[in-house]
Image (cartoon, helix red, strand yellow):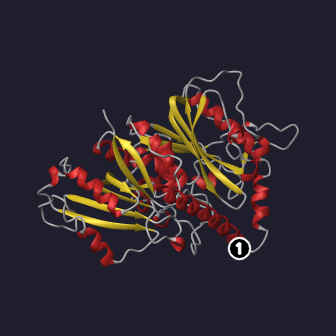
Amino acid sequence: MALTRYLLWCVNDLVGFRVPELRSVAAMLGIQLRFQDPEETEHPYLLVDLEDDESARKILSRTLLVRSCFRLYAAGQSMAEIHRQIRSLIAQDFLSAYREASFRIQVEGFSKTISFQEKLDRVNAFAYLPLKGPVKLKDPDLSLHLFEYYGLDPNRAPEEPYRIFFGRWVCDGQRKQTSKYSLKDRKFIGSTSMDPCLALIMGNLAQVKPGDIVLDPFVGTGSLLIGSGHWGAYVLGTDIDYLTLHGKTKPTRYNQEFRAPDESVEANMKQYGLWNRYLDVVVSDAALPIWRRNLRLDAIVTDPPYGIREATEKIGSKRHKPRPVLGHQVKSHIPSRVQYGLGEIYKDLLRFAATHLEIGGRLVFWYPVNQDGYCEERLPSLSCLQLRANCEQVLSVHSSRRLMAYTKIKEPESSEEPFVDAELLAGFRDRFFGSAAKGTRQERKKTVNEKRQKRLHELHAQLSSASEEGS
Protein backbone atom coordinates (compact mmCIF):
# COMPACT_ATOMS: atom_id res chain seq x y z
CA MET A 1 0.00 0.00 0.00
CA ALA A 2 1.25 3.48 -0.91
CA LEU A 3 2.10 5.66 2.07
CA THR A 4 0.63 9.10 2.74
CA ARG A 5 2.49 12.17 4.02
CA TYR A 6 1.63 13.47 7.50
CA LEU A 7 2.89 16.35 9.64
CA LEU A 8 3.59 15.73 13.33
CA TRP A 9 3.50 18.86 15.48
CA CYS A 10 5.75 17.99 18.44
CA VAL A 11 5.88 19.46 21.93
CA ASN A 12 8.85 21.71 22.55
CA ASP A 13 10.42 19.46 25.18
CA LEU A 14 12.62 16.33 25.32
CA VAL A 15 13.37 16.77 21.62
CA GLY A 16 15.86 13.89 21.52
CA PHE A 17 13.18 11.47 22.75
CA ARG A 18 10.66 12.13 19.94
CA VAL A 19 11.91 9.83 17.20
CA PRO A 20 12.80 6.89 19.52
CA GLU A 21 9.34 7.06 21.12
CA LEU A 22 7.59 7.15 17.74
CA ARG A 23 9.67 4.28 16.38
CA SER A 24 9.07 2.17 19.47
CA VAL A 25 5.30 2.71 19.45
CA ALA A 26 4.99 2.10 15.70
CA ALA A 27 7.00 -1.13 15.94
CA MET A 28 4.91 -2.33 18.90
CA LEU A 29 1.68 -1.68 16.96
CA GLY A 30 3.03 -3.19 13.75
CA ILE A 31 2.54 0.06 11.83
CA GLN A 32 4.78 1.09 8.95
CA LEU A 33 6.31 4.49 9.77
CA ARG A 34 8.85 6.29 7.61
CA PHE A 35 10.60 9.55 8.57
CA GLN A 36 11.48 12.07 5.91
CA ASP A 37 14.39 13.41 7.94
CA PRO A 38 14.80 11.70 11.34
CA GLU A 39 17.92 13.77 12.10
CA GLU A 40 15.90 17.01 12.25
CA THR A 41 14.92 16.39 15.86
CA GLU A 42 15.36 20.03 16.96
CA HIS A 43 12.49 21.31 14.83
CA PRO A 44 8.88 21.20 16.11
CA TYR A 45 7.54 19.65 12.89
CA LEU A 46 8.32 16.13 11.72
CA LEU A 47 7.29 14.83 8.29
CA VAL A 48 6.40 11.15 8.23
CA ASP A 49 4.73 8.68 5.89
CA LEU A 50 1.91 6.43 7.13
CA GLU A 51 -0.66 4.17 5.53
CA ASP A 52 -3.77 6.11 6.61
CA ASP A 53 -5.45 8.25 9.27
CA GLU A 54 -6.21 5.19 11.42
CA SER A 55 -2.49 4.39 11.66
CA ALA A 56 -1.85 7.94 12.85
CA ARG A 57 -4.60 7.67 15.47
CA LYS A 58 -3.20 4.42 16.83
CA ILE A 59 0.32 5.87 17.18
CA LEU A 60 -0.86 9.09 18.80
CA SER A 61 -3.02 7.13 21.25
CA ARG A 62 0.32 6.29 22.89
CA THR A 63 2.77 9.13 22.22
CA LEU A 64 3.54 11.89 24.75
CA LEU A 65 5.83 14.05 22.65
CA VAL A 66 3.58 14.69 19.64
CA ARG A 67 1.02 17.41 20.18
CA SER A 68 -1.08 16.72 17.06
CA CYS A 69 -1.02 14.97 13.70
CA PHE A 70 -2.14 16.47 10.37
CA ARG A 71 -2.69 15.06 6.89
CA LEU A 72 -0.24 17.19 4.92
CA TYR A 73 -1.61 18.78 1.76
CA ALA A 74 1.08 21.36 0.98
CA ALA A 75 4.57 22.39 2.10
CA GLY A 76 6.81 25.16 0.82
CA GLN A 77 8.71 28.34 1.54
CA SER A 78 6.09 30.85 0.41
CA MET A 79 2.31 31.27 0.42
CA ALA A 80 2.32 31.37 -3.37
CA GLU A 81 3.84 27.90 -3.39
CA ILE A 82 1.23 26.64 -0.88
CA HIS A 83 -1.69 27.99 -2.93
CA ARG A 84 -0.27 26.54 -6.12
CA GLN A 85 -0.13 23.07 -4.54
CA ILE A 86 -3.64 23.36 -3.07
CA ARG A 87 -5.14 24.46 -6.39
CA SER A 88 -3.62 21.43 -8.07
CA LEU A 89 -5.21 19.19 -5.41
CA ILE A 90 -8.64 20.76 -6.00
CA ALA A 91 -8.57 19.28 -9.47
CA GLN A 92 -8.24 15.88 -7.75
CA ASP A 93 -11.28 16.67 -5.57
CA PHE A 94 -9.22 16.12 -2.38
CA LEU A 95 -11.89 17.57 -0.05
CA SER A 96 -14.92 15.84 -1.58
CA ALA A 97 -15.76 14.06 1.71
CA TYR A 98 -16.04 17.44 3.49
CA ARG A 99 -17.86 19.51 0.88
CA GLU A 100 -20.96 20.07 3.04
CA ALA A 101 -19.22 19.68 6.44
CA SER A 102 -18.64 22.39 9.02
CA PHE A 103 -15.06 23.67 8.96
CA ARG A 104 -12.49 26.12 10.24
CA ILE A 105 -9.03 27.29 9.18
CA GLN A 106 -6.46 28.07 11.87
CA VAL A 107 -3.11 29.85 11.49
CA GLU A 108 -0.15 29.08 13.78
CA GLY A 109 3.25 30.76 13.89
CA PHE A 110 6.30 29.24 15.56
CA SER A 111 8.82 31.72 17.07
CA LYS A 112 6.81 34.68 15.76
CA THR A 113 3.49 36.20 16.78
CA ILE A 114 1.06 36.63 13.90
CA SER A 115 -1.50 39.39 14.44
CA PHE A 116 -5.23 38.72 14.23
CA GLN A 117 -5.55 40.73 11.03
CA GLU A 118 -2.67 38.86 9.40
CA LYS A 119 -4.28 35.57 10.35
CA LEU A 120 -7.60 36.72 8.92
CA ASP A 121 -5.92 37.71 5.65
CA ARG A 122 -4.31 34.32 5.35
CA VAL A 123 -7.62 32.54 6.05
CA ASN A 124 -9.49 34.66 3.48
CA ALA A 125 -6.87 33.77 0.88
CA PHE A 126 -8.27 30.21 0.93
CA ALA A 127 -11.75 31.35 -0.12
CA TYR A 128 -11.40 29.30 -3.33
CA LEU A 129 -11.56 25.99 -1.40
CA PRO A 130 -14.64 23.95 -2.46
CA LEU A 131 -16.26 24.03 1.00
CA LYS A 132 -19.98 24.86 1.20
CA GLY A 133 -20.60 23.97 4.86
CA PRO A 134 -20.85 26.46 7.74
CA VAL A 135 -17.82 27.91 9.50
CA LYS A 136 -17.61 26.46 13.02
CA LEU A 137 -14.75 27.55 15.26
CA LYS A 138 -15.33 24.92 17.95
CA ASP A 139 -15.37 21.18 17.19
CA PRO A 140 -15.92 21.41 13.42
CA ASP A 141 -16.10 18.37 11.14
CA LEU A 142 -13.04 19.63 9.25
CA SER A 143 -10.16 21.54 10.84
CA LEU A 144 -7.54 22.91 8.43
CA HIS A 145 -4.28 24.36 9.77
CA LEU A 146 -1.64 26.64 8.31
CA PHE A 147 1.75 26.51 10.07
CA GLU A 148 4.51 29.08 9.56
CA TYR A 149 7.93 28.14 10.90
CA TYR A 150 10.33 31.00 11.72
CA GLY A 151 13.12 28.99 13.32
CA LEU A 152 13.85 28.18 16.96
CA ASP A 153 14.96 31.60 18.24
CA PRO A 154 12.14 34.19 18.59
CA ASN A 155 14.77 36.94 18.92
CA ARG A 156 16.18 36.16 15.46
CA ALA A 157 12.98 35.39 13.57
CA PRO A 158 13.19 36.43 9.87
CA GLU A 159 10.56 38.48 8.06
CA GLU A 160 9.46 35.50 5.98
CA PRO A 161 9.05 31.96 7.33
CA TYR A 162 11.59 29.23 6.58
CA ARG A 163 8.82 26.69 5.92
CA ILE A 164 5.04 26.74 5.59
CA PHE A 165 2.76 23.73 6.00
CA PHE A 166 -0.96 23.27 5.29
CA GLY A 167 -2.96 20.24 6.35
CA ARG A 168 -6.01 18.65 7.92
CA TRP A 169 -6.12 17.85 11.63
CA VAL A 170 -6.33 14.10 12.28
CA CYS A 171 -5.83 13.57 16.02
CA ASP A 172 -4.05 14.75 19.17
CA GLY A 173 -1.38 12.99 21.25
CA GLN A 174 -1.45 12.04 24.92
CA ARG A 175 0.35 15.03 26.43
CA LYS A 176 -2.68 15.78 28.62
CA GLN A 177 -1.99 12.60 30.58
CA THR A 178 0.97 14.28 32.29
CA SER A 179 -1.33 16.63 34.23
CA LYS A 180 -3.47 13.68 35.35
CA TYR A 181 -0.43 12.14 37.06
CA SER A 182 1.10 15.39 38.32
CA LEU A 183 3.41 14.97 41.32
CA LYS A 184 1.78 18.01 42.92
CA ASP A 185 -1.40 16.05 43.58
CA ARG A 186 0.08 12.59 44.12
CA LYS A 187 -0.51 10.98 47.50
CA PHE A 188 2.97 9.47 47.97
CA ILE A 189 6.14 11.03 46.54
CA GLY A 190 9.82 11.19 47.41
CA SER A 191 12.96 12.99 46.32
CA THR A 192 13.46 10.53 43.43
CA SER A 193 9.87 10.35 42.11
CA MET A 194 10.04 10.30 38.32
CA ASP A 195 8.46 13.04 36.21
CA PRO A 196 5.08 11.67 34.96
CA CYS A 197 5.87 12.42 31.31
CA LEU A 198 9.17 10.51 31.50
CA ALA A 199 7.51 7.59 33.30
CA LEU A 200 4.95 7.26 30.50
CA ILE A 201 7.64 7.61 27.81
CA MET A 202 9.65 4.84 29.49
CA GLY A 203 6.57 2.63 29.18
CA ASN A 204 6.46 3.42 25.46
CA LEU A 205 10.14 2.64 24.96
CA ALA A 206 9.54 -0.64 26.82
CA GLN A 207 6.61 -1.34 24.45
CA VAL A 208 4.35 -2.05 27.41
CA LYS A 209 0.99 -3.52 26.35
CA PRO A 210 -2.18 -4.46 28.25
CA GLY A 211 -1.64 -7.68 30.17
CA ASP A 212 2.18 -7.44 30.28
CA ILE A 213 4.05 -8.13 33.52
CA VAL A 214 6.50 -5.32 34.29
CA LEU A 215 9.05 -5.14 37.11
CA ASP A 216 10.95 -2.21 38.61
CA PRO A 217 13.81 -3.63 40.74
CA PHE A 218 14.58 -0.15 42.17
CA VAL A 219 10.97 0.88 42.69
CA GLY A 220 11.30 3.67 45.28
CA THR A 221 7.95 5.50 45.46
CA GLY A 222 6.61 3.62 42.44
CA SER A 223 6.41 6.34 39.78
CA LEU A 224 7.44 3.94 37.03
CA LEU A 225 4.79 1.45 38.10
CA ILE A 226 2.20 4.14 37.46
CA GLY A 227 3.65 4.80 33.99
CA SER A 228 3.49 1.12 33.01
CA GLY A 229 0.16 0.56 34.76
CA HIS A 230 -1.35 3.38 32.70
CA TRP A 231 -0.57 1.39 29.54
CA GLY A 232 -2.36 -1.66 30.96
CA ALA A 233 0.50 -3.70 32.46
CA TYR A 234 0.46 -5.65 35.71
CA VAL A 235 3.24 -4.09 37.77
CA LEU A 236 5.45 -5.09 40.69
CA GLY A 237 8.64 -3.80 42.23
CA THR A 238 11.39 -4.30 44.77
CA ASP A 239 13.58 -1.93 46.74
CA ILE A 240 16.17 -2.33 49.48
CA ASP A 241 14.82 0.69 51.41
CA TYR A 242 12.27 -0.58 53.95
CA LEU A 243 11.41 2.93 55.16
CA THR A 244 10.59 4.20 51.66
CA LEU A 245 8.33 1.28 50.77
CA HIS A 246 6.48 1.66 54.05
CA GLY A 247 6.12 5.44 53.80
CA LYS A 248 8.29 6.12 56.85
CA THR A 249 10.88 8.46 55.36
CA LYS A 250 10.99 12.20 55.92
CA PRO A 251 8.41 14.05 53.75
CA THR A 252 9.80 15.88 50.72
CA ARG A 253 6.90 18.29 50.31
CA TYR A 254 7.41 21.84 51.53
CA ASN A 255 5.86 22.49 54.94
CA GLN A 256 4.87 18.84 55.46
CA GLU A 257 6.22 17.74 58.82
CA PHE A 258 4.93 14.16 58.95
CA ARG A 259 3.79 11.65 56.38
CA ALA A 260 0.15 10.56 56.40
CA PRO A 261 -0.37 7.02 57.74
CA ASP A 262 -1.72 5.77 54.39
CA GLU A 263 1.10 7.06 52.14
CA SER A 264 2.36 4.15 50.03
CA VAL A 265 2.87 2.87 46.49
CA GLU A 266 -0.45 1.07 46.78
CA ALA A 267 -2.21 4.31 47.73
CA ASN A 268 -0.89 5.93 44.54
CA MET A 269 -2.18 3.10 42.38
CA LYS A 270 -5.61 3.40 44.01
CA GLN A 271 -5.58 7.18 43.55
CA TYR A 272 -5.25 6.77 39.77
CA GLY A 273 -7.63 3.84 39.40
CA LEU A 274 -4.77 1.43 38.67
CA TRP A 275 -5.09 -0.76 41.75
CA ASN A 276 -6.31 -3.71 39.67
CA ARG A 277 -2.95 -3.56 37.85
CA TYR A 278 -0.89 -3.57 41.03
CA LEU A 279 0.70 -6.88 42.03
CA ASP A 280 2.89 -5.78 44.96
CA VAL A 281 6.19 -4.25 46.09
CA VAL A 282 8.70 -6.17 48.19
CA VAL A 283 11.67 -5.14 50.32
CA SER A 284 14.53 -6.87 48.52
CA ASP A 285 18.14 -6.35 47.46
CA ALA A 286 18.63 -6.13 43.68
CA ALA A 287 22.11 -7.64 44.16
CA LEU A 288 20.51 -10.75 45.69
CA PRO A 289 17.39 -11.44 43.56
CA ILE A 290 14.60 -13.26 45.36
CA TRP A 291 12.98 -14.64 42.22
CA ARG A 292 12.88 -18.17 40.90
CA ARG A 293 14.98 -18.67 37.80
CA ASN A 294 11.92 -19.51 35.70
CA LEU A 295 10.28 -16.11 36.33
CA ARG A 296 9.49 -14.47 32.98
CA LEU A 297 8.83 -10.77 32.53
CA ASP A 298 7.61 -8.80 29.52
CA ALA A 299 9.55 -5.69 30.51
CA ILE A 300 11.88 -4.28 33.15
CA VAL A 301 11.53 -0.51 33.57
CA THR A 302 13.73 1.11 36.20
CA ASP A 303 15.84 4.04 37.36
CA PRO A 304 18.78 2.63 39.36
CA PRO A 305 20.29 4.84 42.07
CA TYR A 306 23.48 6.66 41.08
CA GLY A 307 24.32 8.32 44.35
CA ILE A 308 22.90 11.81 43.74
CA ARG A 309 19.65 11.83 45.72
CA GLU A 310 19.81 8.31 47.10
CA ALA A 311 22.48 5.96 48.42
CA THR A 312 23.82 3.08 46.33
CA GLU A 313 23.81 0.21 48.80
CA LYS A 314 23.41 -3.55 48.94
CA ILE A 315 23.27 -6.06 51.78
CA GLY A 316 26.71 -7.05 52.99
CA SER A 317 29.23 -6.79 55.79
CA LYS A 318 32.48 -4.88 56.09
CA ARG A 319 33.85 -7.57 58.40
CA HIS A 320 36.41 -9.93 56.98
CA LYS A 321 34.52 -12.84 58.52
CA PRO A 322 30.87 -11.91 59.07
CA ARG A 323 29.20 -13.57 62.03
CA PRO A 324 26.20 -15.79 61.21
CA VAL A 325 22.73 -14.74 62.33
CA LEU A 326 21.44 -17.17 64.93
CA GLY A 327 17.90 -18.53 64.89
CA HIS A 328 16.63 -16.45 67.78
CA GLN A 329 18.08 -13.27 66.18
CA VAL A 330 16.39 -13.61 62.78
CA LYS A 331 13.13 -11.87 63.67
CA SER A 332 14.78 -8.69 64.95
CA HIS A 333 17.86 -8.75 62.72
CA ILE A 334 18.46 -5.74 60.44
CA PRO A 335 20.98 -6.62 57.72
CA SER A 336 24.00 -4.35 57.41
CA ARG A 337 24.72 -2.64 54.10
CA VAL A 338 27.80 -1.89 52.06
CA GLN A 339 28.53 0.30 49.05
CA TYR A 340 26.97 -0.93 45.80
CA GLY A 341 29.15 0.40 42.98
CA LEU A 342 27.52 1.77 39.84
CA GLY A 343 29.37 -0.74 37.70
CA GLU A 344 28.04 -3.61 39.85
CA ILE A 345 24.49 -2.22 39.71
CA TYR A 346 24.37 -2.20 35.92
CA LYS A 347 26.10 -5.55 35.51
CA ASP A 348 23.58 -7.14 37.87
CA LEU A 349 20.73 -5.43 36.04
CA LEU A 350 21.84 -6.73 32.65
CA ARG A 351 22.33 -10.24 34.04
CA PHE A 352 18.87 -10.16 35.59
CA ALA A 353 17.25 -8.95 32.34
CA ALA A 354 19.08 -11.59 30.30
CA THR A 355 17.76 -14.29 32.62
CA HIS A 356 14.20 -13.19 33.27
CA LEU A 357 12.98 -11.31 30.17
CA GLU A 358 10.92 -13.08 27.56
CA ILE A 359 12.43 -13.18 24.08
CA GLY A 360 11.38 -9.84 22.59
CA GLY A 361 10.96 -8.31 26.06
CA ARG A 362 12.54 -4.94 26.78
CA LEU A 363 14.86 -3.53 29.42
CA VAL A 364 14.59 0.25 29.89
CA PHE A 365 16.74 2.17 32.37
CA TRP A 366 18.56 5.45 33.01
CA TYR A 367 22.35 5.50 32.75
CA PRO A 368 24.49 8.41 34.10
CA VAL A 369 27.50 9.62 32.11
CA ASN A 370 30.13 12.34 32.15
CA GLN A 371 29.74 14.03 28.77
CA ASP A 372 33.43 14.48 28.01
CA GLY A 373 34.10 10.71 28.14
CA TYR A 374 30.93 9.54 26.43
CA CYS A 375 30.75 7.48 23.25
CA GLU A 376 28.21 4.82 22.27
CA GLU A 377 30.84 2.07 22.26
CA ARG A 378 31.24 2.54 26.03
CA LEU A 379 27.60 1.88 26.85
CA PRO A 380 26.54 -1.31 28.67
CA SER A 381 26.20 -4.34 26.42
CA LEU A 382 25.44 -8.05 26.39
CA SER A 383 25.11 -10.16 23.23
CA CYS A 384 21.55 -11.27 24.02
CA LEU A 385 20.40 -7.66 24.53
CA GLN A 386 20.16 -5.38 21.48
CA LEU A 387 20.22 -1.59 21.97
CA ARG A 388 17.06 -0.01 20.52
CA ALA A 389 17.02 3.52 21.94
CA ASN A 390 19.51 5.92 23.50
CA CYS A 391 18.14 9.33 24.57
CA GLU A 392 20.05 12.01 26.46
CA GLN A 393 18.73 14.24 29.25
CA VAL A 394 21.26 16.88 30.29
CA LEU A 395 21.75 17.27 34.06
CA SER A 396 24.53 19.87 34.18
CA VAL A 397 27.20 21.44 31.99
CA HIS A 398 29.27 18.22 32.12
CA SER A 399 26.86 15.47 33.22
CA SER A 400 23.83 13.81 31.69
CA ARG A 401 21.81 10.67 31.97
CA ARG A 402 20.75 8.52 29.06
CA LEU A 403 17.51 6.58 28.74
CA MET A 404 18.49 3.20 27.32
CA ALA A 405 16.15 0.61 25.82
CA TYR A 406 17.31 -2.93 25.01
CA THR A 407 15.43 -5.86 23.46
CA LYS A 408 16.22 -9.45 24.43
CA ILE A 409 16.88 -11.23 21.13
CA LYS A 410 18.05 -14.64 22.41
CA GLU A 411 18.77 -16.59 25.56
CA PRO A 412 22.06 -15.64 27.27
CA GLU A 413 25.26 -17.64 27.05
CA SER A 414 26.09 -18.97 30.50
CA SER A 415 29.76 -17.97 30.37
CA GLU A 416 29.26 -14.43 29.06
CA GLU A 417 29.64 -11.43 31.36
CA PRO A 418 27.95 -8.05 30.68
CA PHE A 419 30.19 -5.20 29.55
CA VAL A 420 29.92 -2.10 31.74
CA ASP A 421 32.59 0.57 31.43
CA ALA A 422 33.57 1.21 35.05
CA GLU A 423 35.83 4.10 34.02
CA LEU A 424 32.91 5.96 32.42
CA LEU A 425 30.90 5.62 35.63
CA ALA A 426 33.79 6.22 38.02
CA GLY A 427 33.58 9.47 39.90
CA PHE A 428 30.22 10.46 38.38
CA ARG A 429 28.81 11.42 41.78
CA ASP A 430 31.96 13.27 42.89
CA ARG A 431 32.18 15.20 39.66
CA PHE A 432 28.47 16.02 39.70
CA PHE A 433 28.70 17.59 43.16
CA GLY A 434 32.14 19.02 42.42
CA SER A 435 30.70 20.98 39.52
CA ALA A 436 27.84 22.20 41.66
CA ALA A 437 30.35 23.78 44.02
CA LYS A 438 32.05 25.75 41.25
CA GLY A 439 30.65 29.22 40.68
CA THR A 440 27.34 30.71 41.71
CA ARG A 441 24.00 29.45 40.49
CA GLN A 442 23.76 32.46 38.16
CA GLU A 443 27.19 31.71 36.68
CA ARG A 444 26.31 28.06 36.02
CA LYS A 445 22.99 29.09 34.48
CA LYS A 446 24.79 31.61 32.28
CA THR A 447 27.14 28.88 31.00
CA VAL A 448 24.22 26.63 30.06
CA ASN A 449 22.40 29.50 28.32
CA GLU A 450 25.52 30.45 26.35
CA LYS A 451 25.81 26.90 25.03
CA ARG A 452 22.13 26.89 24.10
CA GLN A 453 22.41 30.23 22.29
CA LYS A 454 25.44 28.97 20.38
CA ARG A 455 23.43 25.96 19.24
CA LEU A 456 20.49 28.16 18.22
CA HIS A 457 22.79 30.41 16.18
CA GLU A 458 24.22 27.38 14.40
CA LEU A 459 20.71 26.16 13.53
CA HIS A 460 19.74 29.66 12.42
CA ALA A 461 22.72 29.74 10.04
CA GLN A 462 21.80 26.31 8.65
CA LEU A 463 18.20 27.39 8.05
CA SER A 464 19.30 30.62 6.37
CA SER A 465 21.64 28.68 4.10
CA ALA A 466 18.93 26.17 3.22
CA SER A 467 16.46 28.99 2.52
CA GLU A 468 18.90 30.74 0.16
CA GLU A 469 19.59 27.50 -1.71
CA GLY A 470 15.83 26.86 -2.05
CA SER A 471 15.25 30.31 -3.51
The residue most toward the right is: 320
Q: Residue at x 72, y 33 (%)?
A: 419
Q: Residue drawn at (25%, 60%), measured in percent from left and top?
A: 143
Q: Going by the picture, which residue comes out furthest to the top?
A: 414
Q: Position of residue 376 (x, y in %)?
A: 67, 41
Rate crowding at label 1 as few (under 14), some (14 to 19) or many (20 or more) other CA atoms within 10 Å: few
Look at label 1 and name its amino acid: Arg
Q: Residue at x 58, y 23 (%)?
A: 411
* Image height of 9 relative to 27, above or below: below
The one of 380 and 171 positioned closer to us in this rendering: 171
User: Is residue 279 among the parts visible in the rendering?
Assistant: no
Residue receiving disc 1: 441
Count all numbered tags in the image, as a single digit. 1
Q: Is residue 337 above or below residue 133?
A: above
Q: Position of residue 197 (x, y in %)?
A: 48, 56
Local secondary structure at mark 1: helix
Would you say 304 lies left or right of 230 here? right
- The residue under the point 78% across, 41% down is 422
